[in-house]
Image (tube, rainbow, N blue to C red):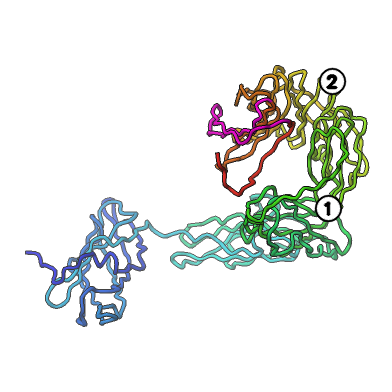
Amino acid sequence: MPEEPLYENPYDPLSENFEVRGVRLNQRDIDDSASVVEGVVQGKLKALADQTTEPVEIRFLNVGHKLFTPENEKFNFTVQTGDEGIAVVRDVAQLDWTFKIEGDTVGQTYLEIELFREGGRIYQASSIPIEVFMGNMAPNTPSSPDPADNATGISISTSLTWSCTDPEDDPLTYDVYFDTSNPPTTQVSTGQTGTICDPGTLDYNTTYYWKIIAQDNQDHSTDGSVWSFTTTGAEGNQPPDTPSNPSPSDNATGISTSPALNWTCSDPEEDPLTYDVYFGTATEPPLASENQGETSYYPGMLDHNTTYYWKIVAHDDHGNSTPGGVWSFTTATFAEVSWTKHTIDGEFESAMSVYATDVDGDGDTDVLGAAWDGITWWENMGGGANWTEHTIDDEFNFARCVYATNVDGDGDTDVLGAGADNITWWENMGGGAGWTGHTIDGEFSSANSVYATDVDGDGDTDVLGAAYYAGYIAWWENWGDGAGWTEHTIDGEFDGAMSVYATDVDGDGDTDVLGAANWADDITWWENMGGGEEWTKHTIDGEFSGAQSVYATDVDGDGDTDILGAAYYAYDITWWENMSSREESSEHTTGSKLTEGLCGSATDVDAGDHRK
């Protein structure tokens, strides 16, 4: 008869209260049919569920299904009574054994043990896991690089240091790879025992890559990651001053959900500076803009009642950099949002279109307008309270649409317009003070809408247009700096084309195009099949009476692109929910009584309260 436990416990105490330590076991071959596992297990009994002060012995019975050891091998624990009378272990028992196994046991197996005290068995458990490993283990991965990974401003006489250990404490040697290629291929040290390496005198303003391979004395090795750092700029040159004067000010509250971030920075030698902008809701914000020349950044529409963090890193042209502090601000709650009307120009006759951006590069938001007699911009003199009017072109007749972006890649804001039969862009000659007009297409019949983005994915700014009488949606490929253009037809039978917009509708990474057709009552998108050379048409709504304007954004916050439209005859503002299918959408009418409109856009007005 097997012995019955003297104490019945409602749970298995060993699986919860027995710690197994030092569970790494090494296996070595003996002959073709058997192996020996030699190992050390340290066991600590944490608690017994009954009250006792008597010595308790542990009997090691078995390991796994195919592992054998002398039966009933005994090891003594000494226990004492702890809190609430529960018996706890005073000492750690160390169990050393050698046992024979059959077959492959590498991987996880388990201990099977019993606990006895005078009078009989008190507990048994057979599911305490251990791990069996084949032979010697490789070194751990090299870590803790110095210079730190991606560090900048490093001395040209720096040393390389790192840390590394071995699971069995085997002696280690290291091979060091170091050069300016990624990954590095030049081995600068072989079999060294220390964790420091001198690569010699380095070049200024250069990025270096390095890697460590650790080897033990059992012919095992472990490759480390590729680390990098960039050396400081030219000798004697001073780094930029610390970025300062943040706007919004640090810890400001009640900030607009569409702010402009501004700062100031200078350089001791008046070197030209560029900036990396870090922005987000984390206290260590991620990189949002890199190597920009302006001291302003527009993060887009933000959430209400949310704290945002931002940081500026200034770089000079000698490879020196200076990080600023982390600033923060909190946006206004929805309850704090109100509207006050401000007239910019009360005599802008036959105004047709408006757009806002920083035209003169001074960090605030200026305004552009299109009217029957030309294209104009108003300079924000600070805070939107006062404006100075500047004419861009007063002979651009019947201007119907205006847009602005950097067309020629020189870093400032250029302006585009659609009017009469023309698609034109005006080159900003500096600070918005002077403009040079360039005709993209002078025979685009009744040009009604213009937009610009990178259509073909080549990194420059292309232009799109909608021609009302011609029923035409087209795009013009930028040859690189706005000096030359190649026209591509997207749809030549889009009757009464009124509006054009472009974004990634289907989430495949390229730029798709959307249009509104007044005569055809259509809201449509064209799928870019690759490089802007081929398009597939998808009708979103073919009965949107007098379709006047189209725009796209994520209205419902589900991560995809929804579509918005304005209908002249239907008096409707409507959005179509993207159902995550290229052929499916769901219509939501959000307004009515629309009497006039050429352009539309959307953002989160009520901080997530999307009522349908």
Residue at the image position 46 percent from the left and 68 percent from the top? 169
Rendering coords of residue 166 (x, y %): 48, 64
User: Disc 2 versus disc 1: distance between alpha carbons?
Assistant: 40 Å
Marks 2/1 in contact by CB < 8 Å: the verdict is no
Rendering coords of residue 486 (x, y %): 80, 25
Image quarter hosting the C terminus:
top right
Mark 2, mark 1: which one is toward the viewer? 1
The answer to whether residue 210 is magenta is: no
Rendering coords of residue 516 (x, y %): 69, 26
Can residue 351 be spotted in the picture? yes
Q: Which residue is mark 1?
A: 385
Q: Residues within 10 Å of mark 1 (few under 14, many from 20)?
A: few
Tell me which amino acid carries mark 2: Glu
Q: Residues within 10 Å of mark 2 (few under 14, many from 20)?
A: few
| Residue that extends furthest to the left in the rendered view of this protein | 1
Can residue 288 be spotted in the picture? no
Q: Which residue is mark 2?
A: 443
Kind of element beneath mark 1 = loop
Tell me which amino acid carries mark 1: Ala
Q: Main secondary structure of the magenta part?
A: strand
Q: Which residues lie in the magenta part?
A: 569-595
Q: Is residue 563 above or below residue 335?
A: above
Task: Examine the image and state in which quarter residue 587 appears.
Answer: top right
Q: Is residue 141 above or below residue 378?
A: below
Does residue 577 appear left or right of residue 533 in this picture? left
Q: How many marks?
A: 2
Residue at the image position 86 percent from the left and 41 percent from the top? 346
Image quarter hosting the N terminus:
bottom left
Rendering coords of residue 57 (x, y %): 21, 75
The answer to whether residue 572 is magenta is: yes
Q: Nearer the viewer, residue 586 or 483?
A: 586
Q: Nearer the viewer, residue 289 or 448?
A: 448
